[in-house]
């Protein structure tokens, strides 16, 4: 009896060891739950990375390139998949856990792949039977493993994928079969909690956060269309059963019926030790005119910490007051302990579209490096009242310049002075210039700065690496009656088969619609001077910028522009212990390895589309792999793809 | 037409054909990074025009019209070579270097014959 009991316990322990998350795994959209994007792997080094080559490559087939010659924002049918708006957008970080590479696709499928060969083990298809809509967009999936698994029982390890119509699927990580005990036969309808102004279903494009046995679920939606869309909310649900444990409402109760979003559409990070989950909260509707929401919305455009067990707020820090620039907090903050003044400080680094890096105490929300309220320009739009001050962060140095770069001489010359003429007609009073009726220069604008993947940290040296875009946009408000007339004309032109362009975004229910566009000349050339994107390294112990370099190459009509110009980027870097940075992100469809000490590119390789997702690093059977999902997003470049490609040193 | 002149024009014809072939390969190769791009379409068209131009030079031999074709071929070599540089296509750049050698050979032979 005693021996039998011992064997049972030993077996249980063995199972536990096998199923729990291991240090070398890549279990999260952001590498680990703390969003560090860091691997302790050391096989690939700055010395040997030049030998890196394709270990395996897989095409999922889940791509839609759009019919030739048609605009990418129109609705067309994908055979067997229904209508899709534009091209596919693949922003999913591959996961490595349970000795398997998992990746979710823009067609809501999960591929489980052998880590050393790329051979498909199984495919799970979550595509809805009758989708109310279909974007062809995916921002990742999640992995969960029971802390005390029951031997012989299914679903002790699960993977989760969401769909555009609010369904969260729970799937056995071993077999690819739906977990019957999760929600209704393996599906939780998150959209059942979409009860206020449900103008659209909750879109579950992104990964859910995992804290012990709780899944923390945010949602994406349709921006720029209705002022009174669904108000922002986040749900805590049981990872085994799908039962709702708590919800967190972001908009104050007296505003929820008339002001929408301020939702959490990006990934989140988790401090398991302290039981906290960190939410990057976006801006509310109308994204560009706040005259109908002059009352403070404290959690909007904030980083907010919740107690993951209860959904109660631990602290919240608003990063932009009365946001009328659509600068959503857009990435999971990176959690790291930093050494400062002889003390270990539990910190987080929140990157942002506005280019500030907010370094906060992650237990209290207090700034470790000061946030200073500075006066900013007033609005000249009737009904609007812009915040008189905004928080600025002098240290660490902003990832973008404080003012918009000057006019590009080449673009100006090529357009016979169009750039200068257009600029003269716009309002440009520097950072936080409010949108205006004549058009305001915004830099950085809603496109960033730093986009939804955030940065990476080496927790040993406490070095933070982040890529950032330098893009100038114009924000122009249009009076309701004027916009409605223009929109009617647009619809009539479209009906008549003309190649009509919509006059802007309607923001129904608001006195103003908005027209947001990038500052280009008639040939499509950027009107501002390069660089267009950079990669930077910061010492978090001092806040000092270690290096900053143009990163990637702009590609237009296939022509590569000079490296000194850099490229706008989407998708984060990852760091390995050996001192390497791996990153795709640029619009030239190349993936690169960069020396963490110097910022020098040591290796690059062509892939089939811009790798706008964050890569994953893992070690399997003694061999280190770096795997990229190269799918593009058609924001930076029209090229999209379906390639999952792993690199390793030759055997 | 002297043999040096034949060699020069022939080299341009070959270079144009090689440039077009490399361009077509890259156009349909998803790993080239320039597949399906307008820039590559331009280069393929310019390479095919080079083949045509070189053929015309061979057929016409000497004279004003052949001279015009030679000038156009020079512009083609420079333009396509520059485009290949910005497309970062080593093969097409090599083909255009070959075409440049052909053009120089042809002009040398033409000069000697005069």
Image (spheres, coloured by chain):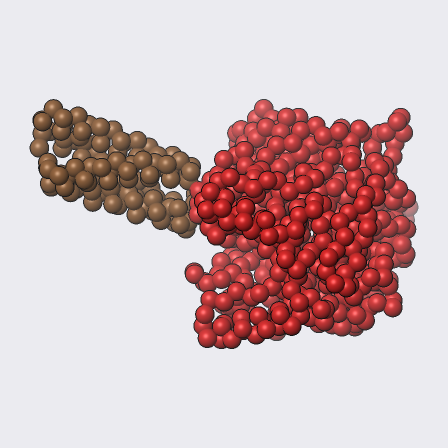
Chain colours: A red, B brown
Question: In the picture shown, does residue A485 fall above or below A142?
Answer: below
Residue A273 in percent (x, y) is at 87, 43
Residue A63 higher or lower than A456, as above or below = below
The answer to whether residue A202 of the structure is visible from this angle is yes
Q: Nearer the viewer, residue A371 or A382?
A: A382
Query: Where's the C terminus of chain A, which quadrant?
Result: top right
- The total number of labels drawn is 0
Hey, which quadrant is residue A597 in on the image?
Answer: top right
Residue A263 locus on image (x, y percent)? 76, 59
Q: Is residue A180 visible?
A: no
Residue A502 % position (x, y): 56, 66
Left or right side of A425 for B38: left
- Taking depth in this image into account, of A12 and B74 the one nearest to the observer is B74
Residue drawn at the location 37% of the way across and 36% of the way down: B82
Is A37 left, or right, of A641 in this rendering? right
Quarter-of-image position of residue A569: top right
Query: Residue at coordinates 47% horizontally, 42% vertically from top-left?
Result: A413
Classify residue A342 by image quadrant: top right
Q: Residue at x 43, y 61 (%)?
A: A69
At a point 14% along the width and 41% down the height, the residue shown is B65
Task: Report x, y in % for residue A385.
Answer: 79, 58
């Amino acid at each position: 009896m005693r021996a039998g009991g011992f064997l049972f316990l030993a077996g249980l322990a063995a199972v536990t060891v096998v199923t729990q998350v291991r240090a070398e795994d890549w279990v999260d959209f952001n590498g680990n739950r703390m969003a560090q994007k860091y691997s302790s792997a050391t096989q690939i080094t700055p010395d040997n990375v030049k030998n890196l080559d394709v270990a395996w490559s897989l095409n999922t087939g889940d791509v839609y390139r759009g019919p030739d010659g048609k605009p990418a924002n129109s609705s067309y049918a994908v055979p067997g998949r229904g209508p899709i708006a534009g091209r596919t957008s693949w922003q999913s970080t591959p996961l490595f856990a349970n000795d398997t590479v998992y990746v979710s696709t823009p067609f809501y499928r999960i591929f489980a792949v052998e880590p050393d060969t790329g051979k498909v083990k199984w495919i799970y298809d979550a595509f809805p039977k009758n989708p109310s809509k279909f974007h062809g967009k995916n921002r990742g999936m999640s992995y969960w493993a029971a802390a005390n698994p029951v031997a012989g029982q299914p679903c002790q390890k699960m993977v989760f994928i969401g769909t555009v119509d609010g369904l969260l699927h729970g799937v056995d990580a071993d077999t690819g079969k739906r977990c019957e005990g999760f929600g209704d036969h393996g599906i939780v309808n998150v959209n059942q909690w979409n009860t206020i102004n449900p103008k659209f279903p909750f879109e579950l494009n992104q990964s859910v956060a995992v804290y012990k046995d709780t899944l923390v679920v945010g949602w994406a939606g349709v921006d720029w269309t209705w002022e009174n869309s669904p108000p922002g909310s986040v749900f805590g649900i049981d990872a085994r059963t799908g039962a709702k444990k708590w919800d967190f409402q972001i908009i104050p109760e007296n505003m929820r019926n008339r002001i929408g979003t301020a939702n959490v559409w990006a990934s989140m990070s988790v401090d398991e030790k302290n039981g906290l989950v960190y939410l990057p909260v976006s801006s509310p509707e109308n994204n560009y005119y706040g005259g109908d929401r002059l009352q403070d919305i404290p959690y909007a455009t904030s980083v907010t910490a919740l107690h993951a067990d209860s959904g109660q707020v631990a602290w919240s820090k608003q990063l932009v007051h009365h946001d009328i620039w659509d600068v959503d907090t857009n990435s999971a903050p990176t959690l790291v302990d930093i050494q400062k003044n002889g003390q270990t400080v539990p910190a987080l680094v929140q990157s942002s579209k506005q280019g500030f890096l907010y370094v906060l105490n992650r237990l209290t929300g207090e700034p470790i490096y000061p946030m200073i309220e500075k006066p900013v320009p007033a609005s000249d739009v009737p009904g609007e009242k812009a915040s008189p001050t905004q928080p600025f962060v002098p240290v660490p140095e902003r990832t973008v310049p404080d003012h918009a770069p000057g006019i590009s001489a080449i673009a100006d010359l090529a357009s016979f002075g169009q750039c200068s003429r257009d600029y003269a007609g716009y309002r440009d009073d520097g950072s936080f210039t409010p949108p205006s009726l004549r058009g305001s220069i915004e830099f950085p604008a809603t496109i960033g700065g730093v986009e939804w993947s955030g940065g990476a940290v080496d927790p040993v040296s406490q070095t933070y690496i982040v890529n950032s875009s330098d893009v100038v946009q114009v924000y122009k408000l249009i009076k309701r009656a004027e916009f409605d007339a223009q929109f009617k004309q647009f619809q009539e032109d479209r009906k008549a088969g003309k190649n009509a362009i919509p006059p802007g975004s309607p923001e129904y229910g608001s006195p103003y619609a908005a027209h947001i566009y990038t500052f280009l000349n008639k040939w499509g050339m950027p009107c501002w001077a390069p660089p267009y994107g950079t990669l930077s390294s910061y010492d978090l112990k001092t806040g000092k910028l270690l290096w900053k370099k143009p990163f990637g190459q702009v590609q237009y009509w296939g022509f590569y522009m000079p490296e000194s110009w850099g490229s706008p980027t989407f998708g984060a870097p990852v760091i390995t212990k050996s001192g390497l940075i791996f990153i795709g992100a640029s619009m030239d469809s190349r993936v690169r390895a960069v020396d963490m000490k110097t910022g020098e590119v040591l290796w690059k390789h062509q892939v089939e589309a811009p790798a706008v997702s964050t890569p994953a690093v893992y070690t399997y059977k003694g061999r280190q792999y770096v795997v990229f999902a190269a799918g593009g997003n058609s924001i930076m470049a029209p090229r999209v793809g379906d390639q999952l490609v792993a690199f390793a040193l030759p055997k | 037409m002297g043999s040096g002149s034949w060699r020069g024009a022939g080299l341009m014809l070959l270079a144009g054909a090689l440039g077009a072939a490399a361009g077509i390969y890259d156009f349909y190769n998803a790993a080239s990074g320039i597949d399906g791009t307008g820039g590559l379409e331009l280069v393929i068209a310019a390479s095919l025009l080079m083949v045509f131009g070189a053929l015309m030079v061979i057929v016409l031999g000497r004279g004003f019209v052949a001279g015009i074709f030679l000038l156009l071929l020079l512009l083609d070599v420079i333009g396509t070579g520059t485009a290949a540089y910005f497309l970062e296509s080593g093969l097409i750049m090599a083909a255009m270097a070959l075409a440049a050698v052909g053009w120089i050979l042809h002009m040398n032979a033409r000069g000697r014959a005069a």
